[in-house]
Image (spheres, helix red, strand yellow):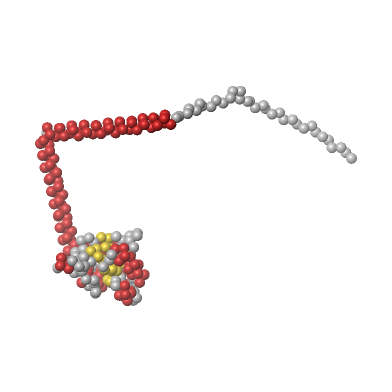
Amino acid sequence: MPTRRRYPRRRTTRRPTARRTTPRRRAPYRYRSRREGWARRRGRQSDVQVLVLGGVLLVAAAVWMLVSWLLAHWWVLIVLAAVGAVTATGWIHRRQQQRAWDRTRQQVLRYGLPELDALHHRDFEYAVRDLMRRDGCTDARQIGGAGDNGADVLATDPLGRTWVIQCKHRRDGDRGSAVGTPDLQRVNGTARQLYGADVVLVVTNGRFSTRCQPLAAQLHMHLADRRTLATWASSGRPLWEFLPKVPPPRKGRQDSGD
């Protein structure tokens, strides 16, 4: 049997690592006593107080110098007062003119059905708001958008009734999709609880489904379809004259309304 030849193992020489001859020195730790920390914080507070006091003194000195100068030049006060009075008078006059113009524009406001059909659904809400203002609801505002809880226009009529209006715009008019009962249920569920509505109204330039009218009667809601909208928008008469069974005015507003 032949013997296996053995080869000598190669020895690897390791390079000796250099050892640190001098030990690493640590930074000396300084113990701070409570009294020293309290004194340091007290010093910082004192610096802040000095800065605040210095700022107050500078402001007081500036005010004193300004008052002294104005007393020595009293005619400047008269000029400033005259300029302020003229500016305030002009601003009030412009506001009055703007309000008068807005009232005049609202009183002659008219819309035709083609004009309403061409509006964007958000502009349709603003048009309903303007029509309510024309009818005397000076606080009418558009609130439609994200989180509106089914209400697009809020208004209070001259007889004190709160109106919550949901607007449903159809670009194709009565040829578009009909407004269904879910739209009525949505606004009915929040109009009285959240907004304290006396009159809940859904207005559209389109049409309502056949099930909307019976449901509106049960929920004591009002509907304004394309025909009612056309009559209201093209005339100067208020909307409540075209709706049946509108709630009576609130107590205490009947005399003021008449």
- Give how far across and how far down residue 20 sits, in percent: 61, 25
- Give how far across and how far down residue 187 sits, in percent: 33, 67
- Residue shown at 29% from the left, 63% from the top: 195
- On screen, residue 93 above or below 16: below
The one nearer the camera, 12 or 230, is: 12
Image-based side of 44 in relation to 84, left or right: right
Confirm whether residue 131 shows in the render: no
The one nearer the camera, 224 or 247, is: 247
- Residue shown at 24% from the left, 74% from the top: 245
The one nearer the camera, 68 or 103, is: 68
**Residue 69 position by quadrant:** top left
Which quadrant holds the C terminus? bottom left
- Residue shown at 31% from the left, 65% from the top: 193
- Give how far across and how far down residue 74 sits, in percent: 11, 35
- On screen, residue 86 above or below 74: below
Give the residue at the far front of this rendering: 35
The image shows a total of numbered marks equal to: 0
Give the residue at the far top of this rendering: 21
Image-based side of 207 in relation to 26, left or right: left
Which quadrant holds the N terminus? top right
**Residue 65 position by quadrant:** top left
